[in-house]
Image (spheres, rainbow, N blue to C red):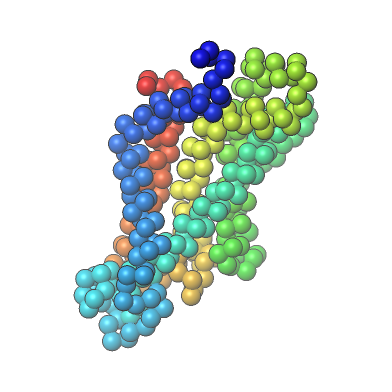
Amino acid sequence: MATDTVPSSIVAARSAYPAVSRFLRHRLALLGLALIVVLSLACFFGPHFLPHDELYIDLKYRFSPPMTHGHIFGTDPLGRDIAARLFVAGQVSLTVAFIAMLMSIVIGVVIGMVAGYLRGAAGSVLMRFVDACLSFPSIFLLLTLAAFVQPSPAMITILIGATSWMEVARIVEAEVKSLRERDFISAARMLGLSSHWIMWREILPNTMGSIIVAATLTVAQAILAEAYISFLGYGIQPPYPSWGNMLNGAQQYLSKAPWLAIIPGIAISLAVTSFNFIGDGLRDALDNRSQS
């Protein structure tokens, strides 16, 4: 079969094999992926295997250390099971992080794509707007916005997504600028294809590698952002548990019951580190200059 008759889907599948092979050789990325799978399964299915839910109060066993009285991670000041609260908090934190990541990717891709493809004042104005947003530290911008809204998982998700798209826009804009002068884009213009078609059907597929890496790292940033604002009291509020507000509630008991802070702290560290490992592995795997 001639090369020019091979379906594009088959060509794309063949080109993906070296990237998959490089990713599978990245040990830290595989470790991160395994940890995320285990953590997600524990958070979303673990509560069904525990004897008590996250709201059950047993004052008789307040401050029970881990692995005592049937509580694998111990209990909190009200006698609530830490494992149940940790897993349900993981559901909240991971869900907030993933949805916020999707929001930031959509906003960043749209703005970066338009700014990178357009020439002249329109593209410059968009990128100056991105620069202006980047000039404010994202955590302070997030805390400022959170102070003026009613805290809820949905609102915190929107705030994190609305304050974490600027880096994505920068990455996409740089990729689009490098692609818009390529021969296949010039050929598309000569064929009379619209700018809309060229941006979303020709350029976007060629930027997906960078977008996927940015999405992975954005999840890690969103987990940290939710933990920051919840720890400071502006994020997820009780009775909804999150890893951040679990740390907030544990700070006054550090000497008496250190596991109250250590356990959610380990969960946050594992999740963030694992997503960063995956992002590093994807960056290496999708780099065309890498050796297959």
Q: Is residue 205 above or below residue 81?
A: above
The front one of 138 and 243 is 243
Residue at image position (45%, 25%) is 14
Extreme residue toward the top, this view: 2
Extreme residue toward the bottom, this view: 60
Q: Is residue 257 left or right of residue 178?
A: left
Q: How many marks?
A: 0
Q: Is residue 284 visible?
A: no
The front one of 130 and 79 is 79
Q: Is residue 280 above or below residue 243?
A: above
| Quadrant in the picture for residue 243 | bottom left
Q: Is residue 97 visible?
A: yes
Residue at image position (37%, 33%) is 23
The front one of 162 and 187 is 187
Residue at image position (25%, 69%) is 72
Horizontal and vertical percent position of residue 242 = 45, 65
Residue at image position (52%, 33%) is 210
Q: Is residue 236 left or right of residue 169?
A: left
Q: Is residue 104 above or below residue 169?
A: below
Horizontal and vertical percent position of residue 29 = 35, 39
| Quadrant in the picture for residue 5 | top right
The front one of 152 and 285 is 285
Extreme residue toward the front, this view: 1
Q: Quadrant of the C terminus?
A: top left
Horizontal and vertical percent position of residue 30 = 33, 40
Horizontal and vertical percent position of residue 164 = 57, 47
